[in-house]
Amino acid sequence: MEHRILHSHVADFANSAQISNLPEHKRFEYFTNYSIVSSIHPEAFTEIGELASIDVDESGTFGIDAISVIVNSNIVQCIDDIDLQAKSNHIDATVLFIQAKTSRSVDTGDVLKFAEAVKNFLLNLSQSEEHDNLNAQKELLQHLFSPKIAKLHGRDSPKCQMAFAYTGSHKVDEFIDEIATGRCRELKSSVPDFKSFNIDFYNAERLIDTYKQVENQFEVEIRFKNNLPLDTISGVEQAYIGYIDAAEFLKLITDPKDQIRRNVFYDNVRDFQGIENSVNTEINETISSPNEVDKFILFNNGVTAVAGLVKNLGANRFLLRNYQIVNGCQTSNVLFLNRKAEHIDSISVPIKIVHTNESEVVGAIIKANNRQTPIPNEAFVALQEWHKRLQEYVSVESRRVGEILFYERRSKEFTLLEQAPEKKRVVGLHSLIRSYTSTYLQKPHSVIANNTTEILRSRSDQLFGSDHSHAPYFASALLLYKINEYLGSLDKDGFIYRHRYHIAMCYCFQICRANKLPPPNSKAAIALADDIVKSIADPDELARRVTKIGGLIRSKHSEFKRNNGYTPRNPPMRSAEFTELLLKSCR
């Protein structure tokens, strides 16, 4: 890869994603997939290991590297995810196909092969594939076209978006562009179920910019002339309150491609509810009314922005870096949708800007500013006192064992830090739910078949109990981290990697040496956690156990297929019966 800056970003990403030992072309693919998908849905990969779920071309010969189904701006990985989005009675679906090439130029043959592979995939959704990930994506698309979902599609849904990435700096020439446009017309004719087809080309500069936007590695200068500096506040470097012209505020939430910066919103609290929402309808009507627009500042509660850096440049100019909009998501989105409205220049937006690197202060601001509207239960669960103590426990215990991890109680909590930890060492709420559910609740199939919101809802009585010891949660997170690290040191075996949650379950069960795991509030649970941590601290023992368990899973997988009518659309990894078979075999 000749582009040195791009090479540097890919290398940093590969290290943080524990994929440094993969071939260069695969590291570039994963970097591309992460950047493009996360630019649409910032929370798409709450753990980097999830990138493997959209990888559909392990051999490099298929013509498509990744497929991602995105519904209402959220990546979906199972049918339940689609059904959850369908509760809004509106579906806006995009099917994203990605092809990444490490070559400097774009080859006509590669573009034609890419388009043809997309066509064949979409025309053969009912045909089973050998690759589990391909079957999973086909299953999602078939559900999108099922009668109960199809009737909810919006006017422009579904769309097919194709992204072709390469490492050169130049843009594609007119000839390549014409070929791509022609192929899109042919696809529309061949696959009329889709409302539109489009091919986007990503050169090195566009990929770098996309990655920086995703990682909040950008800064924005605004004019904030109507501001009042607040007096000294504990834990806060500086803070301002006042109002800002709508055009200046839009700079904070609009990226260089004139798209909304979804990654700057604390969307674990509340994502955009849509223009049809009653409150948003009122905001929209105020903006649209010549007689009401100047009263926007009186009708609106305003926006709160928390930043890792706020620099007063003088003359009412301020530079913000590493910032998040922690309340005012609805206001921001409605303003963005009306950014070209006739009266937008007449609007003043109430705003608070807080410069702090104190996580506790940020958490308190979020809780205080988001109590006035209904919010999903999962949004605040990690801000509770038990999770605060868990964060402290993980910090102390990981240093004791010499393998540093960080528990991120709040989405993007560490992005506000000037020296942010490596992504691979950050354990978020969703990651913790997966690791504990698979390891201690012995439900790896549930982790694979369900989204974490559903797991938390259905197993709330088994997760994060106020009397639960923190030790099992730390041990399960560290175990998954070390399994990922070990598998990442190999030429990653797709089959074994996809069963990493089953490996964690078996590993824990074998260490326990009992028919039943101890309850999480017992001394025995702490002792088991200590034994797991001690075991994985020995690289040779870790490698021996993971290799042996991987062989067991492969053997039992074949046995299960023979005896249980396995179909590619319903792989054993999603089956409770397969989990039980593995547990019996581990005893």
Image: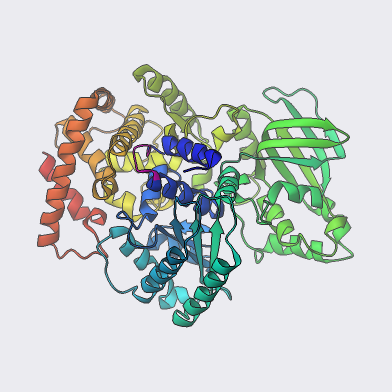
Residue 54: % across, % down: 39, 55
Q: Which residues are magenta?
A: 19-24
Q: Quadrant of the C terminus?
A: top left
Out of 276 and 524, give the one closest to the viewer: 276
Number of labelled discs? 0
- The answer to whether residue 431 is left or right of residue 336 is left
Residue drawn at x 37%, y 24% is 403
Residue at horizontal 42 percent and vertical 19 percent from the top: 396
Q: Where in the figure is residue 344, as x and y percent of width and height?
A: 83, 59
* Position in image of residue 280 (x %, y %): 70, 60
Q: How is the image coloured?
A: rainbow
Q: Residue at x 53, y 45 (%)?
A: 379
Q: Is residue 291 left or right of residue 430?
A: right
Q: Is residue 521 above or below residue 149?
A: above
Query: Any magenta on residue 502?
Result: no
User: Can residue 359 be seen by looking at this rendering?
Assistant: yes
Tell me the chief SS of the magenta region: loop
Q: Nearer the viewer, residue 81 or 218?
A: 218
Q: Is residue 20 magenta?
A: yes
On the picture, is 44 further left or further right than 214?
left
Image-quadrant location for residue 336: bottom right
**Picture coordinates of residue 146 (x, y %)?**
40, 75
Residue 378 in the image: above or below residue 414:
below
132 vs 361: above or below: below
Whether residue 301 can be seen here: no
Between residue 455 and residue 112, name the one nearer to us.
Answer: 112
Which one is nearer the viewer's eye here, 94 or 291?
A: 94
